[in-house]
Image (tube, rainbow, N blue to C red):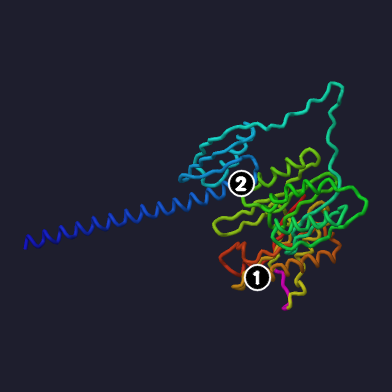
Amino acid sequence: MTAIAQQKQASTLLLIVLIIFLVLSLSTLTVFLKKDVIEADLTQRANRLIQVSGLLQGSAHFEGQDAVVEGTVSSEKNKQKLLDILSEVDGVRSIQANLTIKASEAKPTQASSTQELQKPEVLKGRFTLRHDAGRWILVGEVESEKTKTDLISSTTEVIGHKIVNLLSVVENKPRPPWVDKYLHVLEKFAYVHGGAELTLNKGILTVGGEVDSEAAMRMTLLPFSEEFGDVASIRNTLRIPKFVGNLYQPSKRHAIEKIDLSTLRWNTEHTEVQNTEKLNEIIAILKQNPDIDIEIAGHNSQSDDEDINTDISLKQALLVKKYLLTQEIKKSRLRTNGYGSLRPVSHDTAQNQRIEITVLKE
């Protein structure tokens, strides 16, 4: 009996050892698999920022959460800029920089003692690239049909959506100075989404919309500053949507954003907004503050088909906009978006059917 008991005890111990070994092996395998996923994700995000920044001829790879950056930069200043940008990528633990500094071969021209350096002339002209009501719209004046075609095709290729063309051709007009600069920075503007807007008016370039992070914001603004900085004032109205867990946290900083629009109702065909008392409060604030521009955002998650959710949410936002226009609010102050089910504020589906107001410009 004793021998049998000892044999059972030994078998039990062996089984326990095997289970521990199996658990450790699975844990180790999971760590290795997860490590590969983390490395791939960090590498992709870091190299995307590197490519957009234009600061490095080279690339980054990761060993776990540790970055190794290799290549050539044009100056010590750009090296530091690059390291600052990469350090803001979520998940980066350390950065090893194997960088060579190779100065530009272009030699600066020296002004003679009698020649007075002149400040560049302020960039003239007016153009707008705007995402509104589910459409991308390009507005401006150009000097030829060829320039118009180039702008439409380039914008369509980068944005990936059909462009509503409101460009006008003015014959015998010099080529607008914004055209070439716009083409240089257009690819970077693809980072921006959610009511995106790029507008040049009276020498002020406004870059607005939403980006995913502080790093993406910096990388979006950098090319605009470098291309337009000496000939236009740059106004940054970019925003970073805030999520806690999977729930969106809408802005409630302004009085107009705090107005509860849950009482709004729609007719069955979605051709009319009803119960407009709260919208009259929105109108009163807009009239008291003529410099405020707002986004009217619709949200809907009632369908399993996201296209249907987006369509309904956009229709509702447009109906609110239509009502505001009847009350003498200027169209240029209103942006509309339909986010479908992408921005839930609650696990209760009913609370996610809503209209939100966000201040875009004060």
Q: Badge 2 local density, few (<14 within 10 Å), some, or many (20+)? A: many
Q: Is residue 263 visible?
A: yes
Magenta region: which residues? 263-268
62 shown above or below 135: above
Is residue 264 within the magenta segment?
Answer: yes
Of badges 2 and 1, the one in the foreground is: 2
Q: Looking at this view, is 10 or 105 the one in front?
A: 105
Q: Which mark is residue 307?
A: 1
The residue singled out by tag 2 in the image is: 49
- What's under tag 2, amino acid-wise? Leu
N-terminal of the pair, mark 2 or mark 1, is 2
Q: Secondary structure at mark 2?
A: helix
Residue under the point 74% across and 55% down: 154
Residue under the point 70% across and 49% down: 238
Quadrant of residue 223 within the rendered picture? top right
Quadrant of residue 100 within the rendered picture? top right
Residue under the point 81% across and 58% down: 149
